[in-house]
Amino acid sequence: MPTVTTLAKTHNSVTLSYSATDNVGVTGYRIRMEVTGDQYEHLTTATTHTIDNLRPDRYYYFSVTAYDAEGNSTKSNTHGVKTNPTPIDTQPPTAPVLSAPTKTDKSVSLSWTASTDNVGVVGYDIYVNGAYTATTSSRSYIVQNLTPSTTYSFQVRAKDAAGNTASSNTLNVTTNSLQLSLTLGSTRITESSANDGSFTEKQVVTLSGSTFVADMSNGVTVNNLPPGLSISVSRVSNTQISISFLGKAINHGNQNDVTNASVSIAASKINGANTSVTSGFFTFDFQDPTPSLHLSPEVLRESPNIDGSINDALVVTLLNGKFVADLSSGVSITNLPVGLTANVTRNSDTKLTITFTGKAINHANRDDVNDASVKILRSKIEGALADVISGPLKFDFEDATGAYTYEYNDLNQLIKIKKGDAILYEFSYDANGNLIQKTKR
């Protein structure tokens, strides 16, 4: 029968020693775990064997059976052994080393070298100004919600499962000054459709990095505000205001656009600010209505000589624009009857007169021109984006044959003008004798 002894043990292993004698010779041993319910069996020719992966501070029972070459066997008595208790870990991890951090006005990003331990590092505790702040298993951590322009001390402590710790070096870091910015809701504020220098569109300003104070009725400035305008500020939220533009810009032609306007807010109106904050640029965009032409008269009649000449002067008024100084060219009449020449006189920045010399070659009544117009090149009108063309202009010619006759009613009111047998004009009157209609036939 084999004799079994405990050769060595730890908190999680047992080494057994055993031996047996035989008249021929022992050829092997079977080690089995008894009673405890754990399944373990091992065949070996050695006289010592180590069983691993046991639990600390627990009894285990083993038996050893010896075999000879003939298959004879004999089993030992049950051998009991208790594993050692879990050893107490008193060895701390190696100390982490904090490196130079990155920072903002309100945060510091820490990083450090990895610690090692005889059992294992389970985490790192973060301390700010000596006070515990957080625990992480990684090797970096961002400390947030700090105060701008303030010095803080930081330390990291590595720890193992037994509670052993090792402290890093201490880093003193001063956060950046308060970082503030203003974002504009619009990069272009457009003049109202009234085209009178007023603005109905509002500018919305959003603050990043802090909050506005409660009273925002002053302390807000619009830089390069067009003369004639003033502002009214409404506080929308802790981080947003709305600016309305009051009054009318004195100069509000398209050439008066302001492209470098900006918003400045005083430090006293932003919590924690030490200096004022200014936005990027935006534009005050003034709109010029499309220029147009008004003609008077709209019908140019042949002179009484019935010779193709035109005695009437055509007055052209420019709306929503201004003529350049030199109008010696750039003004023309489309479909001008052949034989006539148009002569242009500039009367003012918005008015010119066209007179006609020469005689139309064809000037019978059938030669009337109903689709003439005045055309002025864009280069002759300040700020114009295209050539400007008037509405229809008519050249009205008369037939020279036959004598003129005039017919009157019983009240001695002219009712017809005839040339030969052709009726040129008819006249109508109301009950009071007032002319109400003149009809050209």
Image: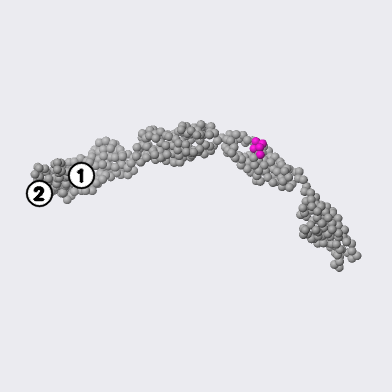
Quadrant for residue 159, please give it: top right
Looking at the image, the residue that sits furthest to the right is 23
**Residue 121 point in image, percent of width and height:** 70, 46
As for residue 129 lying within the magenta part, the answer is yes
Task: Looking at the picture, tell me which residue is in the foreground, 252 or 228.
Answer: 228
Looking at the image, the residue that sits furthest to the bottom is 70
Secondary element at tag 1: strand
Amino acid type of the residue that numbered disc 1 sits on in the rendered structure: Val
Query: Which of disc 2 and disc 1 is earlier in sequence?
Result: 1
Q: Which residues are magenta?
A: 128-132
Identify the main secondary structure in magenta: strand
The residue that label 1 is drawn on is: 299
Amino acid type of the residue that numbered disc 2 sits on in the rendered structure: Gly
**Residue 334 point in image, percent of width and height:** 24, 46
Residue depicted at 65% across the width and 36% down the height: 129
Work out how far the residue at label 1 is from the one at label 2, CA to CA, in angstroms: 23 Å
The residue that label 2 is drawn on is: 420
**Residue 16 point in image, percent of width and height:** 83, 56
Residue 139 is labelled as: none
Task: Looking at the picture, tell me which residue is in the foreground, 32 or 194.
Answer: 32
